[in-house]
Image (cartoon, rainbow, N blue to C red):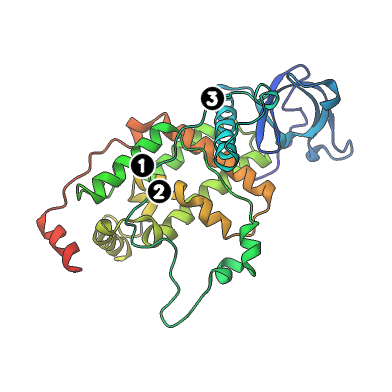
Amino acid sequence: MAPSTSSQPMYQKDERVLCFHHELLYEAKVLDHKMKDPNDKKDGYSYRVHYKGWKNTWDDWVPQERLRKFTDENKELASNLKKDMDAQRRATTGKPLPASTKKRVYGSDAAGSSARGSEDRSSVAPQPPKGTKRGRTEIEGIDKEEDFVRRPAVRIVIPESLKTILVDDWEKVTKDSKLAPVPSQTPISQFLHDYQSYEGQYRRPGSADADILEEVIAGIKEYFNKSLGRILLYRFERQQFYEVHKQIESGHGEHAGKSLCDMYGCEHLLRLFVSMPDLIAHTNMDQQSVSRLREELSKMTQFLGKRVDKYISNPYEHPGQDYSDGVKTGA
């Protein structure tokens, strides 16, 4: 994508904004702006901001990357990030954030409960080839277990509406022996295309924000296509996956050459979101990259949570007695 040639600042003096300070978004006002490098217009702007409810001594110059427009979507994101931080604080210390901090953050409602676990997934991590042994410390370039523990965590905000769907999905597959229809009427690839079109209108063409959105979309597709058969399926779904994969890999038929994102729906994408923290923990991403990825994924789950009827509305189906007997016998 070509860099933006616009020399106009994205945020204006006295504009109401949201500004990242560490992992949370705070309401703020733009006091002033200046070019980072007057000799290089492509280097962008810095902005002096005043955080609402904070003393003037906290006023600071921040790069454009830390600012967000004061939109309903970003306000909701700020609220959800705060809820998640409160939940983590209670889980580790049993105490909420101090009141002095709580009033400064946009949104301070209590966090919701987490989604139910994936009781009988056939595996929890990609398996090494037979005949080889790989310890935990050998995965994805991690040299020491201590390094793994210190990896920055990705706590993706999952709206309550999606947590309920995750529980229902678990019960339908593992308890009721039903399957989500594949190919899906609204596959993951369509959802990601729609989300990119929607979110892209808030990103300046050629900007770093627009590039990040494009990279995240591409990364999710790659992660899903590689992880579905390894870690995202329940045992009862594996035979369905083998049949779908065979159709994709064949050189003929209407599904030949498609990706798994073109076949599966957002029921399975939700499972990837839940698994993402563990997957990211096995990479070498730094804290800044992890925080930005978390923001992008949290906005995506917000978008999906408001459009459940469009993207997660297909009824699950009984696959038939032959399928069920094949699962039991391992055929």
Q: Assign a secondary structure to mark 2.
A: helix
Q: Is residue 122 visible?
A: yes
* Residue at figure coordinates x 57%, y 60% from the top left: 282
**Total numbered labels:** 3
Left or right of 229? Residue 12 is right
- Please name which of the two marks, 1 or 3, marks the residue nearer to the observer: 3
* Residue at figure coordinates x 73%, y 19% from the top left: 52
Left or right of 40? Residue 123 is left
Circle 2 packing at 10 Å, graded few (<14), some (14-19), many (20+), is some
Q: Assign a secondary structure to mark 1.
A: helix
The amino acid on which the numbered mark 3 sits, given as a three-letter code, is Asp
* Residue at figure coordinates x 27%, y 63% from the top left: 242
Q: Assign a secondary structure to mark 3.
A: loop
N-terminal-most mark, 3 or 2: 3
Q: Which residue is mark 1?
A: 166
* Residue at figure coordinates x 57%, y 40% from the top left: 88
N-terminal-most mark, 1 or 3: 3
Circle 3 packing at 10 Å, graded few (<14), some (14-19), many (20+), is few
For the residues labelled 1 and 3, the Cα–Cα distance comes to: 22 Å
> Which disc, if any, is residue 209?
none
> Which disc, if any, is residue 271?
2
Left or right of 101? Residue 302 is left
The amino acid on which the numbered mark 2 sits, given as a three-letter code, is Arg
Left or right of 285? Residue 308 is left
Circle 1 packing at 10 Å, graded few (<14), some (14-19), many (20+), is many
Q: Position of residue 107 (x, y in %)?
A: 59, 23
For the residues labelled 3 and 2, the Cα–Cα distance comes to: 25 Å
Q: Which residue is mark 3?
A: 109
Q: Position of residue 53 (x, y in %)?
A: 74, 19
Furthest-front residue in this view = 94
CB atoms at circles 1 and 2 under 8 Å apart?
yes
